C-alpha cells in the first residue's frame, strides 16, 4: 500500500516490483527494476528516501529517517531480510546482511558487504569492497572475487524475481 504524507507521495518506477503487503509513505523515490518484498515498510514522513535502480529490499525490512537526514540507497544494492536502515547512505553494489541495523549518517562503501546481524553505529564509515561484521561492525577483510560474484548474483536474481512476481497472479 502506498500513502501520501502531507504534500508528498511516493514516486515508484513502473518496472519496480512492490509486494502487495509492503507499505510506502511520503517522500520516497524507487528506481527502475527495484523490488520491495513482503511486509517491508518505507516511511518517508520525516526526510526523503531515495532508492536507485535494481535495488532489492527483502522481507520484513524497515526504512526510516531522522529530520534533515535522507536515506539513500544507490543502484544495485541488496538489503537482506529484517534489516533496519535509518538515515544512512548505502553505496552502489553494497549488500546488507539479514538482521543488520545501519544507523544515522553511517555510510556503507561501494561494493561493501555487511555480515548478517551486524550493527553499524551512527556516523561509521565502512570502506568500499570490504566485509564488515559484528556489533559494532568492524572491517574483517577485503572482499574476494568470489564474494563479489555472489553479491552480483543476488542482485541479479532479485531483479529477475521481482519481474516474475510483478506478473504473477496471487492464489486465492
Image (tube, helix red, strand yellow):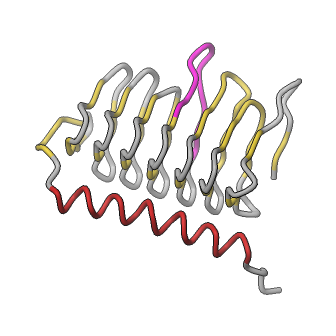
Front-lying residue, 49 or 39: 49
Across and down, in percent, residue 107 comes to 37, 27
Front-lying residue, 65 or 149: 149
Front-lying residue, 145 or 42: 145
Q: How many marks?
A: 0
- Taking the spot 20% from the left edge, 41% from the top edge, the residue there is 130
Front-lying residue, 171 or 109: 109
Where 165 sits versus 3, above or below?
A: below
Q: Quick check: 12 left or right of 56?
A: right
- Taking the spot 51% from the left edge, 37% from the top edge, the residue there is 73
Across and down, in percent, residue 111 comes to 31, 43
Picture quadrant where residue 17 is located: bottom right
Picture quadrant where residue 171 is located: bottom right
- Taking the spot 53% from the left edge, 53% from the top edge, the residue there is 54
The residue at the far left in this view is 141
The residue at the far bottom in this view is 171
Whether residue 64 is in magenta: the answer is yes
Quadrant of the rendering where the C terminus is positioned = bottom right
- Chain part drawn in magenta: 62-72
Q: Quick check: 13 left or right of 86?
A: right
Where 90 sits versus 54, above or below?
A: above
Whether residue 147 is in magenta: the answer is no
- Taking the spot 36% from the left edge, 66% from the top edge, the residue there is 153
Across and down, in percent, residue 81 comes to 48, 58
Q: Quick check: 124 left or right of 25?
A: left
Where 150 sits versus 27, above or below?
A: below
Amino acid at each position: 500500500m502506498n500513502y501520501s504524507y502531507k504534500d508528498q507521495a511516493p514516486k515508484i518506477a513502473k518496472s519496480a516490483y512492490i509486494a502487495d503487503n509492503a507499505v510506502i509513505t511520503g517522500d520516497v523515490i524507487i528506481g527502475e527494476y527495484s523490488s520491495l518484498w513482503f511486509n517491508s515498510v518505507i516511511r518517508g514522513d520525516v526526510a526523503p528516501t531515495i532508492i536507485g535502480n535494481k535495488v532489492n529490499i527483502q522481507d520484513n525490512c524497515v526504512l526510516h529517517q531522522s529530520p534533515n537526514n535522507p536515506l539513500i540507497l544507490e543502484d544495485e544494492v541488496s538489503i537482506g531480510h529484517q534489516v533496519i536502515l535509518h538515515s544512512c547512505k548505502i553505496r552502489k553494489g553494497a549488500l546488507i546482511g539479514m538482521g543488520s541495523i545501519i544507523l544515522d549518517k553511517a555510510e556503507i562503501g561501494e561494493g561493501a558487504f555487511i555480515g548478517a546481524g551486524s550493527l553499524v553505529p551512527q556516523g561509521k564509515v565502512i570502506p568500499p569492497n570490504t566485509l564488515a561484521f559484528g556489533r559494532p561492525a568492524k572491517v574483517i577483510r577485503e572482499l574476494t572475487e568470489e564474494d563479489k560474484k555472489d553479491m552480483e548474483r543476488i542482485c541479479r536474481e532479485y531483479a529477475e524475481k521481482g519481474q516474475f512476481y510483478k506478473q504473477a497472479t496471487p492464489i486465492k
